[in-house]
Image (cartoon, grey):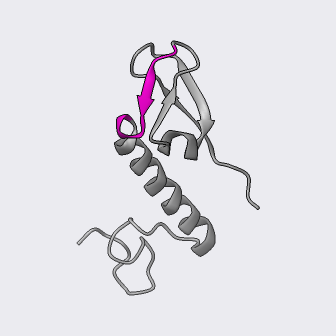
Amino acid sequence: MPAAEMISLECPHCQGELYQPLTWFKEPSFTCPACGKILTAGEFATTIAALEEAMDAYHAEMINGETPSAGCCGGGKKHGCGGKGH
């Protein structure tokens, strides 16, 4: 079983560091360990979605050896475009 992805985000109330597993931020509600305020998954949804997208792209790059978002063919020359952003 893979280790939990740990991330660090800032509490929107006290700006304290929240270093927790990614899944913790997806819970319906949780308490900030620094200030004790109740936080919700919705407060972090946009940030979590962006992080997951970046992690997926990173993993795809590591597996495939190419960046999926670097132009029409991943920035490579396998389709003859060379990733020149056309």
- The quadrant in which residue 46 appears is top left
Q: Is residue 62 within the magenta segment?
A: no
Q: Point out residue 22 in the picture as x, y percentages from the top left corner.
A: 56, 44
The total of numbered circles placed on residues is: 0
Q: Residue furthest bottom?
A: 79
Does residue 53 appear to the left or right of 65 in the view shown? left
- Where residue 81 appears, as percent x and y from the top left, is 33, 80
Residue at image point 55% right, 66% down = 61
Question: Which quarter of the rendered picture does the C terminus lie within?
Answer: bottom left
Task: Residue lying at the far left in this picture: please name it.
Answer: 86
Coordinates of residue 76 in the picture (x, y in percent)? 45, 75
Q: Nearer the viewer, residue 30 or 86?
A: 30
Q: Is residue 38 magenta?
A: yes
- Rendered residue at 58%/75% (across/down): 64
Give the residues in magenta: 36-43
Q: Residue at x 58, y 19 (%)?
A: 33
Quadrant containing the N terminus is: bottom right
Q: Is residue 80 above or below residue 54?
A: below
